[in-house]
Image: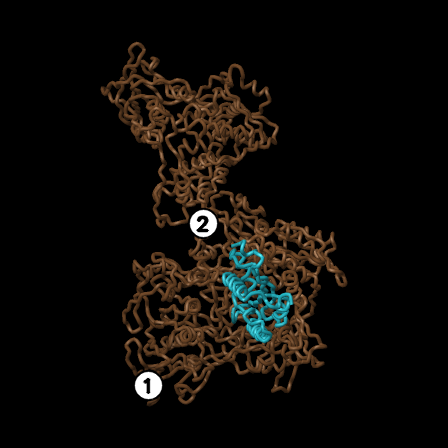
Chain colours: A cyan, B brown
Amino acid sequence: MKHEMISENHFEPVIVAFCCHYCAYAAADLAGIMRLQYPPNIKVIKLPCSGTIDVLHILKAFELGADGVFVAGCLEGGCHFVEGNIRAKRRVDRAKAILDEIGLGNERLEMFFMSSSEGIRFAEVAREMTEKIRKLGPSPLKGV
Amino acid sequence: MDTKSETKKVGAVLVLGGGIGGIQASLDLAESGFLVYLVESSPAIGGVMAQLDKTFPTNDCSMCILSPKLVEAGRHRNIGIITQATVEGIEGEAGNFKVAVKKAPRYIIEDKCTGCAECAEVCPVQRPSVYEEGLAQRKAIYRPYVQAIPNIFTITKNERPPCTTTCPINTNAQGYIALIRQKKFKEALTLIREKNPLPFICGRVCTHPCETECNRKDVDEPIAIMALKRFLADYELAYGAEEIQPAQRNKEEKVVVIGSGPAGLTCAYDLVKLGYGVTVFEALPIAGGMLAVGIPNYRLPKEMLKIEVEAIQKLGVEIKLNTPIGKDLTIDDLRGQGYKAIFIGVGAHRSRKLNIPGEDSEGVVHGTDFLRELNLGKEVKVEEKVAIIGGGNVAIDTARSAIRLGAREALILYRRSREEMPASDEEIEAAQEEGVKIQYLVAPVEILCENDKVTGMKCIRMELGEPDETGRRRPISIEGSEFTVDTEMVIPAIGQAPDLSFLPEGKFGVGRGDTLDVNSISLETNVPGVFAGGDAVSGPATVIEAMAAGRRASNSIDRYLRGENLKDNREKEFMTTTHAPLDIDISKVDKEPRQSMPTIPVEERRGTFNEVERGFSEDMAVQEAERCLDCGICSECMECVEACKAEAVDHRQKEEIIELNVGSIILAPGFDEFEAQLKPEYGYGRFPNVVTSIQFERILCASGPFQGHLQRPSDGKEPKSIAFIQCVGSRDFSCDRPYCSSVCCMYAIKETIIAKEHAEDVKPTIFYIDMRTYGKDFDKYLERAKEEYGVRFIRSRVSEVQQTAETENLMIKYESEDGGLFTEEFDLVVLSVGLNPPKQAAEMASKLGIELNEYNFARTDPFRPMETSQPGIFVCGAFTGPKDIPETVTQASGAASCAESMLSPARGSLVMERELPPEIDVTGQEPRIGIFVCRCGINIGGYVDVPQVVEYAKTLHSVVYTEDNLYTCSQDTQERIKAMIKEHNLNRVVVASCTPRTHEPLFQETIREAGLNRFLFEMANIRDQCSWVHMHEPEKATQKAKDLVRMAVARATLLEPLHKVTLGLSHDALVIGGGIGGMTAALKLAEQDFTTYLVEQEKELGGWARRVHFPLNGENPQGFLQSLIEQVKTNSLIEILTDTVVTKTEGFVGNFKTTLASENGQKQRLVEHGVIIVATGAKEYRGTEFLLGQNEKVLTLSDLEEKLVNSPQEVTRIKNIALILCVRPAGENYNYCSRVCCTVAIKNALKIKEISPEANIYILYKDIRTYGFKEELYTKARKKGIIFIRYTDEKPPEVRSTDGKFEIDILEPILGEELILSSDLLVLATPMIPSETNEELSRILKVPLTKEGFFHEAHVKLAPVDFASEGIFMCGTAHSPKFIDEAIAQAQAAVGRATTILAKNQLEVGGAICQVDREKCIACLTCVRACPYGAPYINKEGLAEIEVAKCRGCGICVAECPRKAIKLFHYKKEQVEAKIEALLTAVV
């Protein structure tokens, strides 16, 4: 298995995860403390709130060749900045529409809500996202 | 301290209890200028809230909202957290207490532990986790939960286990057994050797007192401890031992040991390990003493002894064989050779004589001589028939050896009975198996000989008389019972004595039985420097006792050579036979038989001396070790010491007493759950699928025992039906809990909703008496549960829960409201357990001298809800009575303000401010980045190739310095980081380690101390996001660590220094509303020396309280109100502005400007103030329902109360009176519970009964919500004959007015019949509705209202009196309906919160906040609308600007701004995108 994965032709997606400080990043920490294993393809970028996420950040990641992006914030109603997560979701939807428009497809982008005690969920999300992007194959924008 | 300190106020407060109440009180106090000691009895703060999954009514994740508070308290410079501690005693008086706090040992050095959890990985002992409510196991070394603060481990120890304490040398049996369980055989043997130099031997021939006392005997049989020890020896023999390194010789002195038996070997072993030179002199050609020449090979093969002796020699002990001391080499000679101390351990090798005729004949050989010859390999012959005399192990060894040498018959004669026989049971049994015969109660009289050959023995029978000095019954010969035994060889084995002939005559004291006299504690003989022990002193005893003597002597010799007292503090060296009680219920342990020792068959034993016992296999050993009960909990196996790379474990820590000097004490000990076992009919503890509500919280929690999968404990299946039984341990006289626990209805509803969210098809049912959803938005929550989630509610009483054996499902028997009896089956039952006072309440109360109520909750006065009976000691939270989180938090802030009022003069006197060097100006400098990569012991270093990461980091742009650390967070590394910043002129620092959520503030503080701005710091989380989550892919983990470091460096390059701006502030306060809440707030602010403007729109102060006349519980509302008004009016710091309204407020926290208007707006005035407290109150709804306002005999509750006061004579004429509760106008607006009406109605009904006992009173209700201790009134009302009739929304009562009376139609649900009640007076409980000024005020202050028009707090749970906008607070019924005591608590809470601002000399604002680029702004107002805090505004130039003091730095406006005109400092576009670029440009 391990050898397969490092074989040359195998596609290892690069996935950027924008996580809010209070919940999603804390959930990622908990996944660590619980030693939950997930693919190393996920690279987390911490933001004060998921509401900080700008459509431009997302598009920038794709432009530079990210195969997938997800934004993770607090549970609905649980945002520490009242409703930053809800605003984030709207922006993700907007970005998805743009991805569709330019033909990259919206499946490479997701928004997740999770509480800080959901380490398991974070690991699941990381696994699911990696699998999904692996199936979708490399971003056509890579190396453009 | 000076002499005035007695009266001086101390600026420190002790907060007892680290739940959410204690945390909030601590934070408020610390932020208001007081030093706080937060004393918590458990290992971590967080309390019950940390165990909850979600919180009602918002379903917020409990840990999400709690965790930031934990972290804040944990790192606050003015909060000292003292865990595992209790208050022992108190002296002094309010303002200046001396408190003794007892802190239990953690066995962890707190500032060294990094919380990495490596120790728990290796710990072999498990115990049920208290945090997980017994649904999961934790180790003996543990932290209660992963987010725990302080995030450090602790070790649970019981007293030492009996196996260890009964061992004369305290071999740590529990420890090595625990290690065997983990198959750490090598480590186990090493642990034994810490104490015991002879495991190969003790694993075979020890008398194992450890097994005799083993607690497992009370379950089935003791653990086979000796056999386990032998297994380890066998294992080493099979798999090889590590080369033994000589002990380091670090002491000059040399010591002589005479005799190489177990005493001498142990003494020599200890001394050589201590660094002394040791020489052992042995007279025989073989080392080992009796081990060598006294015990036959079939029990103890000579190779075993050889291994042990060689090991001791390798350590550095010199053994000289064939070197008797005496003639050629005297003790004096040895001294002359420079030996500084001598140990005599020559044993007892001289056989005692029978002293009967014939003993000297040829066929008589003494036992020890016989065995010695045999063991020395000499030819030993036996006759066909051998008689052995004696009852000890020597006799048995002799007999069994004789059989092996070919004797046809071996007969043991013993003069007492089997019971007194000193030989061990196993030996006696084995001997009999092999054919040895034993005759008891027989003594020899004469050995019969012919030609010097034995032909027989004349014996006499004995009987047992009175006990002799040994405690055994004395044998007495029976006259005339002589008989002859037919034998050819006699071996007397009746005991041995030391042979002391080698000692210079007369120099040494010799006692009874020819033994050496020594001091019983030091084992020193009468000759200084000469010590003795073992059989030579005690007479024949056991191997382990001889070893203990060697140990004791080695200790004495060490003391002697170091010139210390030989006897001080040595009591503990003696073994004990009294043991601490077990922490587990032994009756619940499953029986599991002891492994039996495999032996070679009896028929194969004759003619050979091969070892009989074959030892345990690995599986047997592990299985046997599994049986251990871990009586000591921590087994002291020392694996944690080994695993902890931070060297934080210290098993020697002791309990300590800490003296604290504080001005005040706040008690926040919380509550304990009701013990569900006290309601045995519900089956808790007997049926696995009956759980408590708090267990169910853990089951639901994502980080809980089942990772958030809804499953039942017995079989892990997902339950399809769940029953919640309410009022378990509440409203129940049968278990002495008549009060209502206030929170259970809500938490049960929450648990049903969350359960539904976990599993859509689960069917929850709540069995309840009344639904007490009396709080803000609680009724809506109840409706959601019913309508949205389909939760079933059954008004009933549950009589019994039974289990169906096959399915482990549960049958619930209940009686419905109309008296029907039902039984229904459920998969899982949740008991909604009530809240009890904390168990330690009584003890704490007596130590602190505070009064408790009849249930053991703290006694408080309704008008002073946070004051105990002891001045200076305040209380908050569930200890004052059952309550939920917001009320606890409210009381906590309130209690803080009480303490602050008292200690106001000492504010700021003890808080610590750190002197910091001026900041280095890095503007214009090229980035010079230093990178510190943490190994975190092996947590990172074990999986990520840290040196490779460091090498890689060197190649990154702008990096000028790199290093790796074992622990980057350790104190010495902080110093190193500072030094490196200076040495390499670093202007940015990157730490690659763990999570910034917990560690960033620490490193930021460090770089600031080195003169760098805090914002010039960045972290890469290569532990939580790398090594721990990619443990099985070390190469990829290393690659990812490099990626994360590269990303961090890219961002660090672009980091800019940011500075907070300091602002001056007004220390005055504005309180809006002059009711009880507002007046209390004003008074409490004034007590803390803050000037307050108290604004009231009415002409007089008092608000609603003017209409409250009767107490709930003995108090006097009007008396209190008048005195409060008086105090407010006479306080020079309070300016009262009646008939005044607020018309305009500008500014922000610390700097508000408010316009006040009076005389119908004719007079205007501008006041400046730092904070605002909104206390606008509420009023009683007056509509037209049920003829209200149309018929003068229809009253509201307040009307009734006034009538009772003003014209009680009218009331005496009333025969029938009906009170209708929950009278609400149609429509949505007032469709909430007003919380107080049930209680007020009952209060006044009781008053009527008092005035007119004959009156018939009917209370028509939907649910009676007399929560907490108010339940007493309800109970009293029913006892007094007040009639309660329930109605439903579907069938509300109908009222007709006829002839000055009322007729009321109501459906009586118990009878199921329509009743017609006649009433002279009709009283309606109408809603408490918000003040009509709220809407206007909400607009002026830009703070939100609820749909109903009450003010909306910043956070329902943890910020109940705060607004989202800083500096504005609320209290009283402006927030929601409540009682006077609750309003007072809130008012004080608002003051407690407000003073965190007012107490500061200046406010720090700014830093990582947003800023508008005026060139780009088009004033589209998007940001103004998006900001949750009202920070952006349109300035005079018509452009958006962000009010620095209001911005919280979430960046929402940045992302929303269509012109991209706003930036968020520290997360600027280029700073975020630098990370994206760094990640992708290098990888792609």
Most distant residue in the front direction = A9
Which residue type carries mark 1? Answer: Glu
Place of residue B1014 in the rendered image (x, y in percent of width and height, measured from the top left): 68, 61
| Residue A90 in which image quadrant | bottom right
Depth check: B364 or B1019 in front? B1019
What is the crowding at mark 1: few (fewer than 14 residues within 10 Å), some, or many (at least 20)? Answer: many
Place of residue B500 in the rendered image (x, y in percent of width and height, measured from the top left): 46, 19
Q: Earlier in the sequence, mark 1 or mark 2?
A: 2
Q: Which mark is residue B1083?
A: none
Depth check: B248 or B1223 in front? B248
Q: Residue B137, relative to residue B1237: is it above or below?
A: above
Q: Secondary structure at mark 1?
A: strand
Which residue type carries mark 2? Answer: Gln
- CA separation in Å, label 1 and label 2: 69 Å
Q: Secondary structure at mark 2?
A: strand
Q: Residue B1440, relative to residue B457: is it above or below?
A: below
- Mark 1–mark 2 CB contact (< 8 Å): no
State which quarter of the image contains the C terminus of chain B. Answer: bottom right
| Residue B369 in which image quadrant | top left
Drawn side of residue B1212 relative to residue B1483, left or right: left
Please state the chain letter of the residue tagged with numbered disc 1 in the rendered image.
Answer: B
Place of residue B882 in the rendered image (x, y in percent of width and height, measured from the top left): 44, 65
Q: Residue B831, relative to residue B1435: is it above or below?
A: above
Place of residue A40 in the rendered image (x, y in percent of width and height, measured from the top left): 56, 58
Q: Is residue B1127 visible?
A: no
Most distant residue in the top direction = B451
Q: Which mark is residue B1303?
A: 1
Q: Residue at x 54, y 19 (%)?
A: B331
Q: Which mark is residue B126?
A: 2
